[in-house]
Amino acid sequence: MHQQRHGGMPALLVIDVQRGFDDPAWGPRNNPQAEVHIARLIAIWREMSAPVIHIHHDSPHPAGRLRSGQAGHIAKPEAKPVDGELIYKKDVNSAFIGTTLEADLRARGVSALVIVGLTTNHCVSTTARMAGNLGFETLVVSDATATFDRAALDGKNRPAEQVHQAALSDLHEEFAQIVTTDWVITNCKVAAVS
């Protein structure tokens, strides 16, 4: 993990950790500990006064589970923003589209991102791909992300863990480095004090 231009830790991007993803209609999910790991990372970032940035999905569909103004839009307790933390609202998969995220990161001298949240194969993956293409050093935390079962093109069910692993392997060493919560805690704390 390299130093930011102005020193310190990379920004922690917390993507779509919203109550709407608790709806059983999504189907089976992998990594039930994701929110625990997300909360650990948020706590460390706050303790070190490093930037925690929240991305919230505003579903444009009237029946969307993450629609603004509905209970599902609210952040889960493990990822509730506190005063001073930036919140970006998006209505597509990428946190960079339709927001000022890229310009704001560059203005703050942020060159590295640690990405956590939901779901691995959609908004996490799309944001990580764009971050990598935009030149940010991008880390995706495998045990602080999760997804749901998904049908393959042939109609057969793909279990959530398989979908998760496929999404992460497609990102690894192409758009991002795939790491664990423990790796991030160890390496980012070392970088912050060195």
Image (cartoon, rainbow, N blue to C red):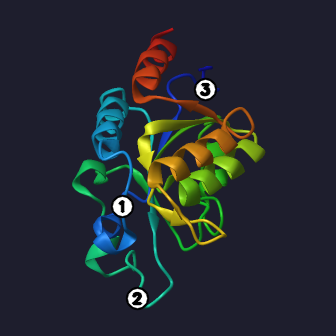
Horizontal relation, residue 52 to residue 109: left or right: left
* Residue at (67% x, 42% y) in the render: 171
Quadrant of the rendered structure where residue 48 is?
top left
Gap between marks 2 and 3 measured at Cα: 41 Å
Q: Say few, some or many: other residues with alpha carbon within 10 Å of mark 2 (under 14 / 14 to 19 / 20 or more).
A: few
Q: What residue sits right under mark 3 in the picture?
A: 4
Q: Judging from the image, what secondary structure is the residue with disc 3 in?
A: loop
Q: Earlier in the sequence, mark 3 or mark 1?
A: 3
Left or right: 127, with 69 as reference point: right
Q: Please, is residue 119 above or below residue 35 in the view?
A: below
The 10 Å Cα crowd at callout 1, few under 14, some 14 to 19, many 20 or more, is few
Q: Assign the N terminus to one quadrant of the image.
A: top right
Q: Secondary structure at mark 2?
A: loop
How far, Cα to Cα, is label 3 from label 1? 38 Å
- The residue lying toward the viewer, choosing from 74 and 121, is 121
Going 55% across and 59% down the picture, which residue do you hit? 123
Q: Is residue 52 above or below residue 18?
A: above
Residue 77 locus on image (x, y percent): 22, 54
CA distance separating discs 1 and 2: 20 Å
Compared to residue 104, the image places residue 8 above or below, namely above
Verify CB contact (< 8 Å) between mark 1 and mark 2.
Answer: no
Say what amino acid the circle numbered 3 marks.
Answer: Gln
Q: Amino acid at mark 1?
A: Pro
Q: Which mark is residue 28?
A: 1
Amino acid type, mark 2: Ala
Task: Give the numbered dot on residue 14.
Answer: none
